[in-house]
Image (tube, grey):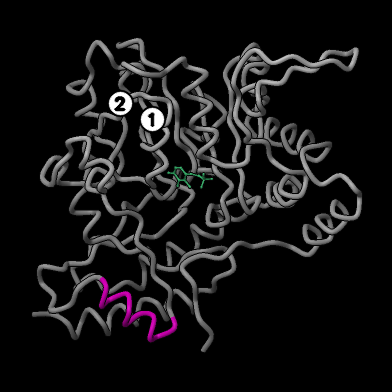
Amino acid sequence: MSFLPFTRPSIDEATIQGVAEVLRSGWITSGPKVKEFEAALSAYFGGRPVRAFSSGTATLEVALQLCGIGPGDEVITTPMSWVATANVILHVGAKPVFVDIDPTTRNIDLDRIEAAITSATRAIIPVDLAGLPVDRDRLYAIAAKHHLRVIEDAAQSMGASWHGQHIGSFGDLISFSFHANKNMTTSEGGCLVLNDEAQIPLTEKLRLQGVVRAPDGTMDVDVAGGKANLTDIAACIGLGQLPHIDGFTTKRRELVRHYFACFDRSLECQLPLENFSDSNWHMFQILLPLEKLALSRGEFIEQMRQREIGVGVHYPAMHLFTLYRNLGFREGDFPHAEKVGRETVTLPLFPDMSLQDVERVCSAVQQIIGSARK
Ligand SMILES: *Cc1c(COP(=O)(O)O)cnc(C)c1O
């Protein structure tokens, strides 16, 4: 039996061929492929302006800079995400303000946001954990009422939708990641969807050293921009991925339906919310009933590995990392996020998996949990 990883990108032969052509072309950094990729993304997002970046972390940071957020400002976000979401707030000198999650969706609890708003609050960064969209109607109502910007961390929700519209095709600023583990990849990369054409020049300056080139060949710099441009090699992978994104989502949904059908409910694992309209099923995550088991999460992962199955942990609650403890956050601050952080495991899910693979995972979980009950 071959090892089943928790995720694996699906790259077709035409894409591999395309990358080889870029490598032979003599132009391998940002060039025509990036422009073509940005145009294709813009079409996918209903014509909104889009710029490609070297990572989803860079897009979040540039989005904060576009909003003019810096020292003295507060940004509300969730403690249950990849640590990039909060690190970027620190990078621009602002203060992350965590709001606990809703235990059902595992996303930021919209009912708790208003209590966290102060006169220093400038923006909300919601995260669509595992590709399940945060309620956009309620989110934007709260933001409008309090005059806050929204930077959607949609790193995990490429291909997901809200009321039938793709995430990214509406809203304020939307940040995507194309890291290898995301539903669509460029190996490393990301894109930022803007809401206003007028923001394009500053976005491009923040992306690459603040450089502005004049038609006469001279250049000037008036902003200390970063270094976050995407390469043509990466853009070529993205051009090969984008036409498949909705097909990938369909395949993931089919596999997840099988997980729900095969999973032994008597094990008392908490399964994710069953959502087949909006979520792109970036991950299939269960919470282990650790209090009822004579087994730690580490031991569960190890026993799965012995059965040739990869399991991930996404994520430990961010506020308990040393960096955030040093800012004053403590155990007990966000109990729902902490519980998910302790108990969550990510089971294998990617488009090239088979229904038999799902059955294999379900029976391994059943054997391990079934025989570990206290
Ligand atoms: C992956 C991810 C990021 C960062 O994206 P990179 O491309 O790895 O920089 C940010 N937020 C979330 C929720 C992510 O999953």
Residue under the image location 19 percent in, 86 percent down = 371
The percent position of residue 46, horizontal first and vertical second, equals 65, 28
Assess whether residue 299 is covered by the magenta stretch.
Answer: yes
Assess whether residue 264 is covered by the magenta stretch.
Answer: no
Residue holding disc 1? 89
Hey, which quadrant is residue 53 in on the image?
top right
Q: Main secondary structure of the magenta part?
A: helix
Viewer-proximal residue, 219 or 340? 219
Viewer-proximal residue, 267 or 82? 82
The percent position of residue 83, horizontal first and vertical second, equals 37, 45
Q: Which mark is residue 95?
A: 2
Q: State the CA–CA distance, disc 2 to disc 1.
A: 6 Å
Residue under the image location 50 percent in, 62 percent down = 254
Give the residue type at disc 1.
Ile
Instruction: Name above or below for residue 32 compared with residue 72.
Output: below
Q: Which mark is residue 10?
A: none
Viewer-proximal residue, 259 or 332? 332
Instruction: Name above or below for residue 272 compared with residue 170.
Output: below
Under tag 1, what secondary structure? helix
Under tag 2, what secondary structure? strand
Hey, which quadrant is residue 283 in on the image?
bottom left
Rendered-image quadrant of the C terminus: bottom left
Region of the chain picked out in magenta, as a range: 298-308
Callout 1 crowding tier (Cα within 10 Å): few <14, some 14–19, many ≥20? many
Instruction: Name above or below for residue 256 compared with residue 48.
Output: below
**Residue that sits furthest to the left in the current view:** 374
Instruction: Name above or below for residue 186 compared with residue 350.
Output: above
Among the two numbered marks 2 and 1 on one chain, the one whose residue lies closer to the N terminus: 1
The percent position of residue 296, horizontal first and vertical second, equals 19, 73
- Residue 138 visible in the shown view: no
The reply to whether discs 2 and 1 touch (Cβ–Cβ < 8 Å) is yes
